Image: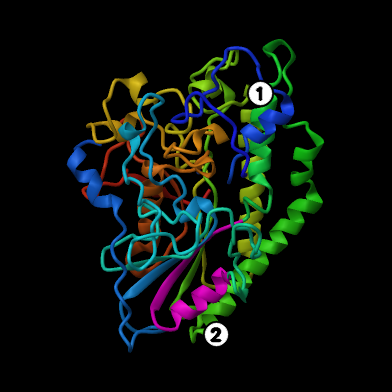
């Protein structure tokens, strides 16, 4: 999105009028989205990704320090991992990582690939003697895209713009002891960003007494037809096959590494669990969750199960003996965007993300923002509806449990001590890895 629209407030996503001052066309541009502490002193220690140790010359398949590599899209790259909760009055209150949050090049001076947003809070860095390498990229699909912003897919592309994630994995694994590869991909193949855009535009352009839902729009429903679901599932199988090929080409047999297929978390509660009324504009102007109740219900009952079902099906279809599954479906339940029981800093009466109890009382999913937040604002539109700082660290805690001291296992992850979420000594939300649902 390159259209810059004027805004009286560039620091938040809020619309400036209580009326509906925009046409549907203007709102479609405006709402474009990209697919998302008990002791304050403990949290900063978990924020920074440890500097990756240079592999020793003798390191390689089965030899040397173990590595975890993450591949996929924004939900595993670390998109929105800068922000711990949200505030409409002062972005500094939620700014856990600062403007260098996505700097991942060797010198820490910028991004290796612009707008991949590989946050230092991303889940790849589980620590404990295990090195992490994050090759995921916000906006990626299963196949590489060389448009205005290069987006490496999980393939072997190589060109002037860059390399595909499978090729990057193959090259990295040749000189590292890669023990676990974690893949989260498919959401963008289902056009998730355009679905969110349609839902928010419909919310903002229809009155309470004549709601225009997105779940019955033909353009939205087309993404979830049986034929399209089957097509995306097949593309995910191809991506997983590429991962296996990359590891084989790097000299690994299936007994030397584990492939973990990770599903997506629910980012918003059902309509009845949203703390803002359907009437008026508070859901979007304050909460950043402009969805009608029925559309929020449909997102949880249809969209998420369909996308995650395609991933789980692909994990089975690929037919590898070393596949595990990390189900994130309910990982943020109780801490989702606009959910009852959590709130903005000004709503819950805490001064900042470093305040004791912030992890339990703030949201773990970033607000849906608009192009009015770009320019001199610290926010990116593409951060919308992604796991924020707490969410990223929660997923890291889940992944460490999947690693299981080097004997990877499957499981479903949920918030530990729900209603009184706590931080571990390393500064992450305490999570529970239960049986795979």
Please give the name of the residue rendered at 34% of the width and 28% of the height, measured from the top-left corner: 361
The answer to whether the residue labelled 1 contacts the one labelled 2, judged by CB atoms less than 8 Å apart, is: no
**Residue 435 in view (yes/no):** yes
Q: Secondary structure at mark 1?
A: helix
Examine the image and state in which quarter residue 149 appears. Answer: bottom right
Residue 389: image location, x then y, percent: 37, 43
| Protein image colouring | rainbow
Residue 80: image location, x then y, percent: 44, 44
- The image shows residue 220, relative to residue 256, as above or below, that is above
Residue 289: image location, x then y, percent: 54, 28
Of all residues, the one furthest to the top in this rendering is 209
Q: CA distance from mark 1 to mark 2?
A: 49 Å
Q: Which quadrant, please, contains the N terminus?
A: top right
Q: In this orientation, which residue lies closer to the viewer: 88 or 58?
A: 88
**Residue 156 in view (yes/no):** no
Q: Earlier in the sequence, mark 1 or mark 2?
A: 1
Q: Secondary structure at mark 2?
A: helix
Q: Alpha-carbon neighbours of circle 2 within 10 Å: few (<14), some, or many (≥20)? A: some
Please give the name of the residue rendered at 55% of the width and 56% of the height, measured from the top-left corner: 73
Q: In this orientation, which residue lies closer to the viewer: 140 or 161?
A: 161
Which residue carries the number 2 mark? 249
Which residue carries the number 1 mark? 203
- The image shows residue 356, relative to residue 52, as above or below, that is above
- The image shows residue 198, relative to residue 134, as above or below, that is above
Examine the image and state in which quarter residue 279 appears. Answer: top right
**Lateral position of residue 242 relative to residue 39, left or right:** right
Q: In this orientation, which residue lies closer to the viewer: 284 or 249?
A: 284
The span shown in magenta is 162-185
In the image, which disc is placed on residue 162? none
Does 82 lie within the magenta span? Answer: no
Residue 94: image location, x then y, percent: 34, 35
Does 174 lie within the magenta span? Answer: yes
């Amino acid at each position: 999105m390159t259209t810059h629209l004027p805004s009286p407030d560039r620091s938040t996503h809020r619309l400036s009028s209580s009326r509906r001052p925009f046409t549907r066309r203007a709102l479609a541009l405006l709402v474009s989205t990209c697919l998302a502490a008990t002791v304050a002193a403990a949290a900063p220690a978990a924020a920074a990704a440890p500097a990756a140790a240079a592999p020793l010359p003798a390191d390689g398949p089965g030899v040397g320090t173990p590595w975890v590599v993450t591949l996929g899209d924004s939900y595993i790259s670390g998109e929105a991992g800068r922000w711990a909760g949200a505030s409409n009055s002062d972005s500094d209150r939620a700014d856990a990582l600062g403007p260098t949050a996505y700097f991942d090049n060797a010198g820490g001076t910028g991004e290796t690939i612009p707008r991949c947003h590989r946050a230092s809070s991303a889940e790849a860095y589980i620590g404990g003697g295990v090195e992490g390498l994050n090759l995921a990229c916000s906006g990626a699909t299963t196949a590489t895209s060389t448009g205005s912003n290069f987006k490496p897919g999980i393939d072997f592309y190589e060109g002037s713009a860059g390399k595909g994630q499978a090729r990057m994995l193959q090259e990295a694994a040749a000189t590292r002891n890669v023990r676990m590869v974690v893949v989260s991909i498919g959401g963008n193949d289902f056009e998730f960003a355009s679905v969110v855009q349609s839902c928010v535009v419909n919310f903002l352009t229809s009155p309470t007494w004549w709601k225009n839902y997105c779940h019955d729009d033909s353009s939205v429903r087309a993404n979830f037809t049986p034929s399209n679901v089957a097509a995306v599932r097949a593309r995910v199988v191809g991506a997983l096959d590429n991962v296996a090929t990359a590891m084989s080409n790097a000299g690994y047999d299936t007994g030397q590494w584990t492939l973990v297929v990770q599903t997506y978390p629910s980012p918003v509660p059902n309509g009845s669990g949203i703390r803002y009324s359907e009437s008026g504009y508070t859901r979007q102007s304050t909460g950043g969750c402009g969805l009608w109740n029925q559309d929020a219900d449909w997102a949880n009952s249809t969209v998420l199960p369909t996308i995650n079902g395609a991933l789980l099906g692909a994990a089975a279809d690929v037919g590898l003996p070393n596949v595990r599954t990390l189900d994130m479906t309910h990982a943020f339940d109780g801490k989702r965007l606009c959910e009852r029981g959590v709130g903005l800093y000004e709503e819950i009466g805490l001064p900042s993300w470093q305040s004791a109890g912030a992890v339990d009382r703030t949201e773990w999913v970033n607000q849906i923002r608009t192009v009015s937040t770009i320019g001199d604002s610290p926010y990116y539109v593409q951060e919308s509806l992604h796991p924020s700082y707490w969410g990223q660290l929660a997923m890291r805690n889940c992944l460490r449990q999947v690693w299981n001291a080097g004997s990877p296992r499957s499981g479903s992850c949920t918030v530990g001590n729900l209603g009184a979420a706590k931080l571990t000594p390393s500064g992450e939300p305490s999570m529970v890895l239960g049986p795979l649902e």
